[in-house]
Image (spheres, grey):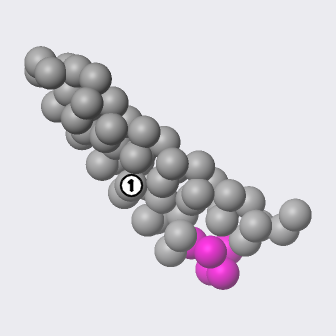
Amino acid sequence: MNKNTVLAWATFIMIFMGLLLIALGAFRYDDVAGWGFAAVGVGFFANAWVFNALKGRM
């Protein structure tokens, strides 16, 4: 596995975890904690975007 493959897997895992956290915030927690889970999920999407942008540049 080279660097691009590792970044591709990291991007996939971050997108999956982001979707999972947003789903937890939307469907599991109805109070203020749901907003926190959704915000962290959006943060995971931002990190995945950075990892995807780094592919081929490192």
The residue positioned farthest toward the bottom in the image shown: 56
Q: Position of residue 55 (x, y in %)?
A: 62, 75
Relative to residue 11, is residue 22 drawn left or right?
left
**The C terminus is located in which quarter?**
bottom right
Residue 55 part of the magenta segment: yes
Q: Nearer the viewer, residue 43 or 38?
A: 38
Q: Position of residue 2 (x, y in %)?
A: 84, 68
Q: Position of residue 44 (x, y in %)?
A: 41, 47
- The secondary structure making up most of the magenta span is loop
Tag count: 1
**Is residue 18 at least partly visible in the picture?**
yes
Q: Residues within 10 Å of mark 1 (few under 14, many from 20)?
A: some
Q: Against 38, is 30 above or below?
A: above
The part of the chain drawn in magenta is 54-58
Q: Position of residue 8 (x, y in %)?
A: 66, 65
Would you identify the image quadrant in which residue 27 lies? top left
Q: Residue at 20% of width from left, 26% of height from top?
A: 34
**The N terminus is located in which quarter?**
bottom right
Q: Residue at 66% of width from left, 81% of height from top?
A: 56
Would you identify the image quadrant in which residue 41 lies? top left
Q: Amino acid at mark 1?
A: Phe
Dot 1: what SS?
Answer: helix
Q: Which residue is mark 1?
A: 45
Q: Residue at 50% of width from left, 74% of height from top?
A: 53
Relative to residue 36, is residue 50 drawn left or right?
right
**Is residue 36 at least partly visible in the picture?**
no
Q: Nearer the viewer, residue 23 or 9?
A: 23
